[in-house]
Amino acid sequence: MVIGLPSPPTIIEEDMHVCEVPIVNSHILNESSPASFCSTILPLESLPTISAELSVDKPNKCLFNLEELPFDCLTGEEYRGHGVDLTDGIIYLTTYRLFIFTNESCYSFINCPVRLIDSIEIKDNIYLYIQCKDMRSFRLIFFTTEKCSYWLNELNKLISVPLCLDNLFAFKFALSKTNQERSLRDRFNDEFTRLQLDSYPWRLTEINRKYELCTSYPEFCIVPSAITDDELFEVAKFRSYRRFPTIVW
């Protein structure tokens, strides 16, 4: 018995081929459930099952328990739909990612941010080709034109130019993190320490605060500790665009 929402997939590792079998139900949820970064992949037997006594022509709109997703949603990430096939695999779609989960292994999956998708093309009515900006590509095969068109439309909605920037996942994620905002100086100090430049012969200078000395340099720069800020100021006078010597990476 096959159960779920439009287009259950299976993945063939050679060419990342995804194949669909017929489905009998659909699930739609407009609520969001922010959580932490994706860190856990659940085995297929722990994934949700849905009653198969529903007509294909009259899809059942019911709530989906976000806690049963095989990944943790990011803050601001919203569930858009999924297709379930207990013998082949599952495809999930959120405002942030396209997630394809196969039963070949509980660790076999594709996790692709939707904004990483460069183009989507439908061929022969049942083939969906997805090309990513990082050179990855996926091929999905559907048994019906309707299911193929459904996922094409859903994905195109997410990758198209938004009418309002506030609708982008990146903005919702950023707005939800305002209470955890750190200063630019704090973040730069972390990077300063990570690069192991927080000791002799280097130091951190704020001579370019508000970009007053050099408009093309950051506010915080790493320079030799033996050189004072006064010396840097004088040196900058004789350099193109006042670009004094500093570490870049």
Image (tube, grey):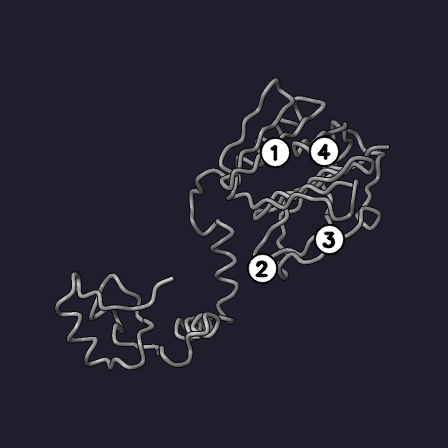
Residue at 84% from the left image edge and 35% from the top image edge: 52
Give the mark, 3 or 2, whose residue is nearer the N terminus: 3
**Mark 3 crowd level (few <14, some 14–19, many ≥20, 10 Å Cα):** some
Q: Which mark is residue 12?
A: 4
Q: Earlier in the sequence, mark 2 or mark 1?
A: 2
Question: What residue is at 68 percent from the left and 41 percent from the top?
Answer: 100
Q: Amino acid at mark 4?
A: Ile
Callout in the foreground (3, 4):
4
**Quick check: 214 left or right of 50?**
left
Q: Is residue 189 above or below residue 125?
A: below
Q: What amino acid type is highlighted by mark number 3?
A: Ile
Find out whether the residues at labels 1 and 4 contact each other: C-beta distance under 8 Å: no
Q: Nearer the viewer, residue 180 or 240?
A: 240
| Residue corresponding to mark 2 | 75
Q: Earlier in the sequence, mark 2 or mark 4?
A: 4
- Image height check: is 160 above or below 63? above
At which x and y percent is residue 55? 79, 30
Q: Which quarter of the image is occupied by the C terminus?
A: bottom left
Q: Which residue is mark 1?
A: 138
